[in-house]
Amino acid sequence: MSDLPRSLSHYLKLARRELGPRLPVYLAVTLLATALDGVGLALFVPLFHLVAGSQDTDGMLVKNLNDWGIPWTLPSIGLLIVMVFTIKGAVKLGEGAYGGWLQAWLTRRWRARFLIGFSRVDYRNFTTKDAAALAHISGAELHRAVHAMFQFCLSLAGICTAVAYFVIAAVTSLKITLATLFLALIPAAIMRSLNRRSKHLATQLVTESTQYQSFVTELLHQAKYVLATDTASRALPRQLDRNHQLTQRGFKLSLLTALVRGLREPLLVITLCALLLLHAHWGSDSIDSMLFVLLLIYRLLSQLMAQQATWQSFLGTSPSIDVTLAEIEDCERHSSHSGGKPLPKGEHRYSLQNVCLDFESGRALDDVTFQVEPGEVVALLGPSGAGKSSAVNVLTGLLRPSAGIVCVDGIDLTQIRRADLQAQ
């Protein structure tokens, strides 16, 4: 399977899951605007006839206008065109407003999921994460992910619009429409090659940017130690080289995006000129059909070229969606267990019974047993690495023991509601 279908299928599933019914509503508004545009373009055919002084009333559109009680006059046709495109403008305004609301809603949803997931994440899982990278993902990366998702929605809307123009054009003249598709194969191949290269660069850029941001954040957090030692001087050359590589990749990605935008108009004009030459030599359709289909084809090709630019922009930021959702879903997947038993407020008796705690690096607690009575003050003494912090983390429920039981007033800690424990 090629990169384009795989990306489209993957992100379509994500969009349907994250946006729900809001996505088809957005696409429906787009199709309504396209239908109105098709009606408006069709009205230009009788308008051109009237401007040229023709009184031909044999066309299907003219007969429909007469059936609807619309007189075959220049003012009435012109007024109808203005009305249709005014309604289309209102629909496009609604489309833009709905798209803006959709971005704001998705930003709020992902932020809430991140915060809720973090508040419930299992502490052992959290200790394996890079806090600096999480800070970057929850901020700039999340905004890039929302922007990428909206660009994907715009791409879907562009595809729906192009398909609608194609259907209208094919119904009017299938031969001209098929000829256009044949002529558009070469521009499509060029754009596809550029898109694949952009996707590869964007993935590298997002991954390395997150790593670089993590390093800088950690450097700032450890500023006291860094300034007192030669840590910065030893790490500086490698990070400066990474920064240079990030700059180069960012420039290449911008250059590819600019190339797509620059090629759009020339490729469109070349395709239209080739279509006109084909029709001049082998065309047999009426001038009315030819004129209307050309207007539709121009709209179709413009939409396809614009869609390529939108897709290019989406590919440049699409890895942010995967990175952001991966972290959110990982926090949700590793949420800490919460029991159902309530814990009254006040002082309680805490006890550890034959508790062991294992990490990948080794055992932190080995068969530990002690009890803390209500109101009793207990101090844990021992050298660094003896397990003092681990014992407290197990006692408060932050870490689950590998073996043994932690109890509060004789109740297993895992059976007590998490919120009640946190409130103590």
Image (tube, grey):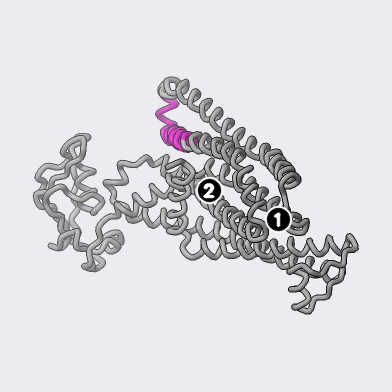
Q: Which residue is mark 2?
A: 148
Q: In the image, what residue type sits under mark 1? A: Val
Residue 171 seen by the camera: yes
- Number of marks drawn: 2
Which residue is label 1 attached to? Answer: 293
Image quarter of residue 260: top right
Determine the residue positioned at 63% across, 57% down: 170
Query: Magenta segment: does it hold 217?
Result: yes
Q: Secondary structure at mark 1?
A: helix
Q: Earlier in the sequence, mark 2 or mark 1?
A: 2
Using a 10 Å C-alpha cutoff, classify the residue at mark 2 as few (fewer than 14 neighbours), some (14 to 19) or many (20 or more). Answer: many
Q: Is residue 182 left or right of residue 269?
A: left
Nearer to the camera, 67 or 207? 67
Question: What numbered label is drawn on residue 94?
Answer: none
Residue 304 in picture, x, y percent from top left:
62, 48
Horizontal and vertical percent position of residue 363: 16, 38
Q: Is residue 220 something one can see in this rendering?
A: no
Q: Residue furthest right?
A: 53
Name the quarter where the N terminus is drawn. top left
Label 2 to label 1, Cα distance in Å?
A: 34 Å
Q: Where on the picture, by quarter, is residue 110?
A: bottom left
Residue 136 falls within the magenta-colored stretch: no
**Does 366 appear above or below 371?**
above
Range shown magenta: 204-228
Camera-side residue: 252 or 337?
252
Secondary element type, mark 2: helix
Residue 298: x percent and y percent? 70, 50
Which residue lies at the image location 73% right of the left edge and 53% below the top edge? 284
* Amino acid under disc 2: Ala
Name the foreground residue: 216 vs 35. Answer: 35
